[in-house]
Amino acid sequence: MTDEDLIKAARNAAQHSYAPYSQFAVGAALRFSDGRVVTGTNIENASYGMALCAETVAVAKAMAEGIRGGLEAVAVTGPSDRGGDAPITPCGRCRQVLNELAQLGGTDPDVLCVGNMDVTRLKLSQLLPLAFGPANLD
Ligand SMILES: [Zn+2]
């Protein structure tokens, strides 16, 4: 699956967003070394603080399917009519959640932060330098 396809998968996932409070639909797609792709979208709650981000949902789905590594790339998309043209980046919590899955497989995935005008490609280690992870508990 190409990066373009991964971004499309994230956009498709965002169509199932449950964001009645923010109206800010986010999509995420994870690509693994064996070719699998797992997507997620944000899920809000009437108790606002209970909201789940798209990236966290995708990681939870992947781990629930037994995936424990091989994370190669992540695409994150936001609504095209909100937030300006800047590429959307994972929030701090999601960076940590992605790091857990990545470290299990010893990868430093590309994170494709999609904006209206372009895509910013960063390594997860750039988004979360000096990350605390599973190895710190060995
Ligand atoms: Zn998040």
Image: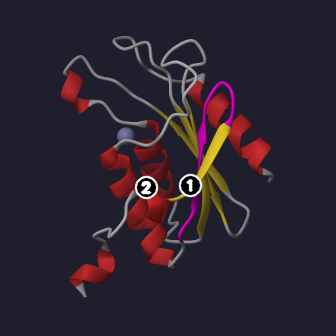
Looking at the rendering, in which quadrant would you find the C terminus?
A: bottom left
Kind of residue at badge 2? Leu
Say whether disc 2 or disc 1 marks the residue closer to the N-terminus: 1
> In this rendering, is residue 15 above or below 4?
above
**Left or right of 2 on screen, residue 62:** left
- According to the picture, the residue beneath numbered tag 1 turns out to be 122
Labels 2 and 1 touching (C-beta < 8 A): yes
> For ligand 1, which image quadrant applies?
top left
> In this rendering, is residue 9 above or below 79?
below
Count every numbered label the image shows and give the total: 2
Dot 1: element:
strand
Q: Quadrant of residue 109?
A: bottom right
Dot 2: element:
helix
Q: Position of residue 80 (x, y in %)?
A: 61, 18
Query: Of residues 54 and 115, which is closer to you in this image?
Result: 115
Q: Which residues are magenta?
A: 108-118
What residue is rendered at 23% in x and 31% in y? 50
**Left or right of 39 on screen, residue 89:** left
What residue is rendered at 65% in x and 24% in y? 116
- According to the picture, the residue beneath numbered tag 2 turns out to be 127
**Left or right of 107 on screen, residue 138:** left
> In this rendering, is residue 84 above or below 12?
above
